[in-house]
Image: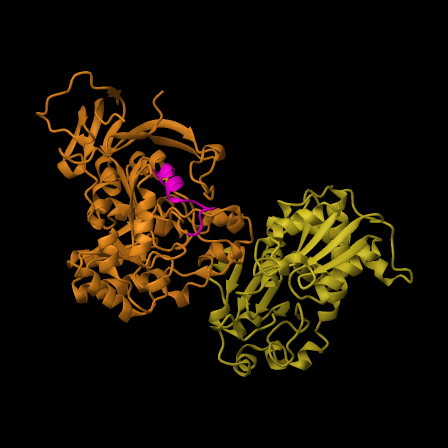
Amino acid sequence: MATGTTFAHRHILGMEQLSREDITHILNTADSFKEISDRSIKKVPTLRGHTIINLFFEPSTRTRLSFEVAAKRMSADTFNISASTSSTTKGETLADTGRNISAMHPDIIIIRHSCSGAPLLLTRHVQAAVINAGDGAHEHPSQGLLDLMTVKERRGTLSGLKIAIIGDIAHSRVAHSDIVGFTRMGSEVYVYGPATLIPKGIEQLGAKVCTSLEEAVRGADVVMTLRIQRERQNDPLLPSLREYSRRFGISRSVLTLAKPDALVMHPGPVNRGVELNPDVADGPQSVILDQVTNGVAVRMALLYLVMGNS
Amino acid sequence: MNTTWRITNGRIIDPANHIDQIADLLVIDGRIAGPDQPVPADVPEIDAKGCWVVPGLIDMHVHLREPGEEYKEDILSGARAAASGGFTGVACMPNTKPVNDCATVTAMILGRAAEAAVRVYPVGAISQGSEGHQLAEFGEMQAAGIVAVTDDGRPVRDSQLMRRALEYASGFGLTVISHSEEAALSTGVMNEGPVSTRLGLKGIPTAAESIMVYREIALAEFTGAKVHIAHVSTAMAVDLIRAAKARGVRVTAETAPHYFTLTDEAVLGYDTNTKMNPPLRSAVDREAIKAALADGTLDAIATDHAPHSILEKEVEFDAAANGIIGLETALPLALALVRDQVIGEVRLVELMTVNPAAILGIPAGTLSPGAAADVTLIDPQRQWRYAADQVVSKSRNTPFLDWKLQGRAVLTMVGGTIRHSLFA
């Protein structure tokens, strides 16, 4: 089913740790797992007897569901812990939570946390493999990988493409993982958004910062938009969502600047009418639901690979 | 306890008296003896061959955590750490629980300090509770023993309050120490730049420091009062201070060893022992700090010794407390500046003795005849490793753990009494 190439990572904490070869290996593995979800009996015994814990300190619908579906299709036993039901409300530290969970001998812990670096902290206190399902504004590697998979499926390659990422780059772990991932695979990533949402030094991750929406979108193979939040912790980042949608939102006319068959992507959930006009979000170029489908395959691959290595 | 010594063969470096020579230093009854004082019979000898004999080091910026957080550090443990690092005097910041904002707390601290290994100089709060509203009673606290005032850790937001603090303190000859940080810009957890973007951590811009440094300079210039800028971390703040000094503003400033040793790249890996406030800055800032230590823009090296337990540090980076311990590593890190030819030996001693003493107006930092015999012997060649089981402070929150260091205080003497010695 999977290739014989070795996979050297016990934990998946970010795209930054993954080489071009690692990424190719993960995508090939995901590709081979994808058809399982098309079967009438959507289950293989690969991870039977393995315990996987979803440790979510932030609300999440699709990522958690996607990991759970992936785990169950591989026959693993899954358990969900969310912050509201965990001991953290009683003041338990992440280190203690990790040590306690570890005492129950799970094989994989999937963690989402609002603090950047929390998954790395967890690895120091558990025996299990740790997969980062999103940490603060740092990384969301499985999302980055499913984005790569989706583009590769449609374009046949990840090299030489122009990827435009529009929106809140500063607070987006998806943007971070995508910039690193697409750049590493040989594409060029152009970012654009309100200047309040372009973080200092993003060029050092490989992104090219554009000065206009047109510059970012013109000739693009992929137009990826990010979810926008008007205010974060009383930080006056934007005057209004109205202005955002008019100046930075992707409409049909903006999309005509991109290649005719450019892909429209979004990590979800979409603020319809803000970062994406509904006719674009639901239009023929949108691959937003392909992203969701591929998410399951990529996560199956990650679960398989971190286990194969332990 | 014996307080009479003859320290022989050492290189005496005493910047206040323009002395840098190999000579013997005589201590009689806890005081530095004059050159023509007769040597008493049977005086015990300390062979300082290969060592520097310098005035006891003064750290003008430490947090001793007592009263209130004795599980992190207390006055006695902090003083032991100070002595082992070569310090004979430390100025302790008022952000204890309760805040040192009244004579009662000051007296309590000094009562405890009577038993301490080194001299403890309390710094009082600028505002009651350091809440930034009402001035604390500077006069009462001064009578009880404070040497300066500050709201360190909780920067004064209200410019009018800072103006009044400077004016009022000047009437008592007290120095106001400013933790210069514009609060609205300082909601992050590390320096803002490419590294914070890479790590996805919220940044604190360098402008947060320089804006407030300029406010303090403008207020000091207008009122004629003196102000001291604590833990300078940025190139722009250095430029502002340099220009202010050139036009005669009564501004002094310190930096801490981590700002001339590390950059924000040390945060890669999310080690919470690289989290402090102000944060570690860029390489450009670090080089500017070094240049400012050399050219006199910065007057003192202070540690900002800030002990925290694992309760505050073994957590997510966002949730971790700011600060690192520094008393035991300051001297070797500063000696690296001498080896790297950033500053000379005499300048180093000046930065860690007579200058901070002068800023605080305390009778220390020199080897003048008649002065209390606060003396530190430094072996600038000694190689050692700062291992966890050797840490003297109650806390171990330092990014320098397990660093191989060169240079160490091998003997610390306070009023002629040996408080730390590595002599067999």
Choose top left, top right, bottom left or bottom right for residue B150. Answer: bottom left
Towards the viewer: B250 or B55: B55
The residue positioned 59% from the left and 67% from the top of the image is A164
Is B156 on the left or on the right of B22, as rendered? Answer: right
Query: With respect to residue B413, does B300 lie above or below?
Result: below
Q: Which residues are magenta?
A: B68-82
**Residue A205 image position (x, y, % from top left):** 53, 56
**Residue B318 image position (x, y, % from top left):** 52, 57
Can residue A283 be seen here? The reply is: yes
Q: How is the image coloured?
A: by chain
Q: Which chain is orange?
A: B
Residue B81 within the magenta-colored segment of the rendering: yes
Residue B94 within the magenta-colored segment of the rendering: no
Can residue A18 be seen here? The reply is: no
For the C terminus of chain A, the image quarter is top right
Query: Which residue in the rendered view is the most extreme toward the top?
Result: B42
Rendered colour, chain A = yellow
Choose top left, top right, bottom left or bottom right for residue A111. Answer: bottom right
**Residue A217 image position (x, y, % from top left):** 57, 71
Is B37 on the left or on the right of A97, as rendered? Answer: left
The residue positioned 38% from the left and 40% from the top of the image is B76
